[in-house]
Structures are given as structure tokens and as C-alpha cells.
Amino acid sequence: MRIDFRRYLAGLFVYGLFFIVLFSAVEAFGWWNQDWQYRRKIAFDTSPAGADVKENISEIPVLVRLHLGNFNFGNAKEGGEDLRFVAADDQTMLKYHIEKYDTIDEIAAVWVKLPKLSGGVGEEFIWMYYGNDAAVGGQGARETYDASQIGVYHFGELEGMPQDSSMNGNHAAVFLGGLGLPGVVGNCAVFSGGSDKMIIDNAPSLNFSNGFTFCAWVRIAQPQTDSYLFARSDEDKEIVVGIDDTKVYARVTQAGGGVSKTDRSADLSLGAWHHVAITGAPDEKVAVYIDGLELSWAPFGGSIPDLAGAFTVGADASGNHAFFGEIDEVRIAGVQRSPGYLRASYTSQGPEGTLYQVGAEEISDGGGGGMPVFYLASVVKNITLDGWIVIGSLVLLSIASWYVFFMKAVSYYLIEKENKGFLDAYVQQQEISALSCNDNRFPNSNIFKVYKEGCQKLDSSLCYVNGMEDDDAEPETRAPADKGGKLGNRAINAVKSILEKGYMEQTQQLNAWMVVLTLAISGGPFLGLLGTVWGVMNTFAALAETGEANLAAIAPGIASALTTTIVGLLVAIPALFAYNYLVGKMKNITMELTVFIDQFGVRVDEMHGD
């Protein structure tokens, strides 16, 4: 069966058109500003499978952690000045500020204010835009927090007083402790007992009459002797958040001696960071939350005491009840934050980061839509030596298969073309061997080569010696094959044997080097799979060594490992199509050769047989 090369190309065109249409059907969203080249979708999941936030929340600042696994620092400005956060409508800009942006270690911590966060859903998202060299900083730390936030302390300073990032400007008036050490988010404050503490002077904004929320990330390395995390007092009134041994408690003392105190059941494990939050509201309760979960509470009657004293962190105002440990992200609010708010804060700030996922990078098309691009640079950067060895082997195999394909395709084309020319000339000849000397006309025709060998054998078998047939006559006594001499069965069978021998030789030449394509087809995917399994094994071995097990850590290694499988398939798939194409061509050529040999044998029988 003859394969039409034009139909083959048409089929490839149709398949290519299909895939173009398929991938062009990716949903295109509007682009907030064409001056920004890149964007990523940040999707929030408050369902039980994600952060498990059950209530709707408004105006909450969430921490967006950026690292090599979810952000390409090379596509943004060196200090992140071109970062912009836009709501899902791709129009409303969101307030944000950068706490840390390190292009050397390729990590960043950015606080973004969400106007709303629905509970129990996994469909909300915002956009993060970047990639504009002309952009200037668009941060607004004070606007990132709502009006109820009295104080926010990131401890990003290397020396001096910790600064308040909220709109109230309640900066620390006294700080005796250590700064500059790594914390949960950026740097933290270290309190080593003794006189270490942070004091925030009294201000009109430090008003807890409507309720209060104190929260911070805390890590202790040893049990505490009734140390104070937060404290504020005024004569016989006070609010205290303390740690006794490893138990967190809260105590509110009202004027006249009324005390509301939680039990000491909220435990902190040693050596680990925990999100500690304490809330209180008039005529409600005082509650202690650890890592977003309410662990203890006590009823509270009456109003929150009116306190005029300073607010202290790490001890009381006189330096007693000193705290030993590290504190990060201290927050003071003049309202009672809801359980959902605290749960969302913990899940966005914690190392696990279950509140959101950062999507793939999309690039502006210069119009109104964006198409995803691949992390080719990141993948290539993370390919290990063993991966490169496998990929190099596959590339060599691919080069060999393409070389064989083009060589055979050209060869088969010339053979088919000259076979057709020879057969057209042959059917017009009366004499069998009339074309046997036309070597220059059909140098690539395998039918002509077999025909020539058959004619040579026929010429050597036909001779007239004294008018009698003699197959053993000397060459000078032989007559031309077309003089009508008769041959015996032995001589005719000898001619047919030569034809069969020529057929086998030509078939071997047609099949030569085809094994390279079969190696590419069968060996390419397996070599790629070997590289993938080896890379995955190395990735998990590295995780075992470092003890860090999270998606961001393993994603680059897994992606680079899978690259070898992709390369293996890219080697095998074209080789498969090329092999099938060449096999079809080869079948046509061998079929024509078989038919010619049969016809030639019949003609010799008719003209020279007894």
C-alpha cells in the first residue's frame, strides 16, 4: 500500500492546528496594567482542606511569602518596588508593604490587606503583578492595617527602637533586648531575662474599652517562672498575659479586686514557634489561642479596666517577671478579634502557609490577556549532574535518529523516483537487457540494480556453441541475451536465484540504520524514566538530610527530575512517527521490487525457456 507523503503532511498540519486551538483556549483574563509584564494568581483556601476558616472576615492583613519555588526574583526589580497586588476584578489595587525582600537568598515577606476573606470556600483569589523597571515603590504600611490595629511590630530593625507599622505610630520608647536574629517572618526580638523588655508609652490610641487582642509568635527554649509576654497596669488594675512553666494564661484585674483569669492549660512546646493570641471583650470572656485554636477561656463581667500605664512586652514595667525567649510579629488591637481572624492570621503567617497558594507565572501578551509561561530557567537551574548525563544521552540519541530519518527519507524518495523512471522505460523495451548498460540514468534505483544483476547472469548463461546451448561456454563464445537462445531449467533457476539474492541485498540496504529509530522509540522513554526516578530519589534523600519537608522545598527538584522524562518523550515521539513513515515507504519499495522480480522471471521463462 502506497503512503501519500502529502497526506502525511496534511495529517501533521491538522494535528498541529488542533493543539494550537486547544492551548489557545486557555481562559484569558484582563490585564490590570500593560506596563507590568508578569503576574501570578494567589488563591485562598479557607475550606476544611485548607486553612479551615469558618467565618467571613474583613480587612485582614495576610502574609505572602515569596521564594524560589513560587516567584522568579529575576523578573522583578531588585528591591521589589514593582510589586503590586490587585483584587480579583483586576482593577482594585490592594494595600501592602514589604517586610523583607532578599534577592540573594531569594525570599520575601509581603503583607497584603484583603478587603474580605470568605470562610469555608476555596475559590477566592487576588493577583500579584511585577516586572516593570520604571515602577517606583507603592507600599503603604499604615494603610495595610485597619483602624482597630493599635500597634504592629515586625522587629526588622538591626538596632534602636522597634517601630510601629500601624497608623498610630506607637513606637517603642524603651527596648532592652536583642535584634537582628531570624524569626518566623524576617527578624525577631530576643529577651534574655534580667532587664530585657520593650516599653510602649501610654497614648490615646491604647484604649481597650471596646476590647483587646494581643498576639505574637513566641518561642521558648526553657520553662518560664511566671514570665510576662504582655502587661499593662494602673494602680490596682491590670491586664497580664504570662507563661508559667510552659503554660500560657491571661489575667484581667478590675478596680475593686475583681479578677478574670484563664486556667493554665494552653501549653507551649519547647524550641518551636507558636502563634499566641489573647482576646477579651466587655461582658464576654478572656480567651487564649495557640496556633489559631482556642485552648482556654474565662468569663469576664463588666468593662475593661481603664489603664493609664505603659504597655510592656517581655516583663512588667518595673522589670519583674522577665521573659526568656524570642518574640516576633507583636500585634496590639483595640477590639476582640474573632476566632476566624486569628485562624487566618496563623495559617497565613505560619511556615506551612495553608491559607493560600501562589500560581504559575503569566506573561502579558501586550493586549488584554495573558498566557502562562514555564519555569524553564528554574528547571534548568535545578537539573543535577546525573540529570544532565541522561539528557545528554537522549540528545545524542535524538540527533542520531533525526539524521537517520532525513538520510533514509531522501534515499527512499530518490529510489521511488528512479524506480518509476526505470519501470516506465523498461515496459517500452522489446529486449530484456536493453537497459542493462544505463547505469548513469538510474544510479539510485534498487529495481535497476537487481535487473542489471539478472541481465548479467542471463547473458553469461546464454551462448551458442556450434548451434548448441552450452552454459559453460567461454565469455567470448556467448551470445547476447536477446538473440532468442533457449536455456534449461537449471540455467533459468540460476537467473532467478540471482534475482532473489539481489532482492535480499536491496532489502538489507533499505533496513540499514533503522535500528537507531527503534532504539529512540523504545529506549528514549526508559532513559527519561531512569533520570526521573534517580532525580526523585536524590530529592527525597536531600529532604531526609535537611529535615525540611514542604512543597516549596521539593517542587524544584521534582520538576527538574521530570524534565528527563519529558526529554525522553520528545526523543521517542518524533522517532515513532518517522519510523512509521519510513516503514510505509519501505513496504511500497519492496512490493514494487517483488513484483518486478516475478515479472522478470516470467519474461525470461517465456523468451528462453524450453
Image (cartoon, helix red, strand yellow):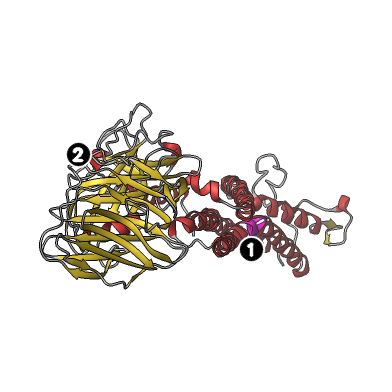
Magenta segment, prevailing SS (helix, strand or loop): helix
In what element is the residue under mark 1? helix
Residue sitting farthest toward the top: 134
Compared to residue 264, the image places residue 153 above or below, namely above
Compared to residue 312, the image places residue 103 above or below, namely above
What span is colored magenta in the figure? 511-516
Instruction: For the residues labelled 1 and 2, say whether their Cβ atoms are less than 8 Å apart.
Output: no
Q: Which residue corresponds to the image point at 49% horizontal and 60% vertical from the top-left? A: 1
Q: Give the quarter of the image for residue 35.
A: top left
How far apart are the two marked residues, 1 and 2, measured between alpha carbons? Answer: 84 Å
Q: Give the quarter of the image for residue 158.
A: top left
Residue 345 position, x and y percent, is: 28, 56
Q: Is residue 558 left or right of residue 295?
A: right
Tell me if I can see residue 7 in this picture: no
In what element is the residue under mark 2? loop
Q: Is residue 396 left or right of residue 50?
A: right
Which residue was labeled with disc 2? 91
Q: Comparing marks 1 and 2, which lies closer to the viewer?
A: 2
Q: Give the quarter of the image for residue 314.
A: bottom left
Question: Any mark on residue 602, and which?
Answer: 1
**What amino acid is found at the position of numbered circle 2 in the picture?**
Gln
Q: Which one is nearer the viewer's eye here, 140 or 503? A: 140
Mark 1, other Cα within 10 Å: few <14 / some 14–19 / many ≥20: some
Residue 480 position, x and y percent, is: 77, 51
Residue 65 position, x and y percent, is: 38, 49
Q: Which one is nearer the viewer's eye here, 40 or 92? A: 92
Q: Is residue 146 left or right of residue 129?
A: left
Q: Which one is nearer the viewer's eye here, 57 or 257? A: 257
**What amino acid is found at the position of numbered circle 1 in the picture?**
Val
How many numbered dots are placed on residues in this image? 2
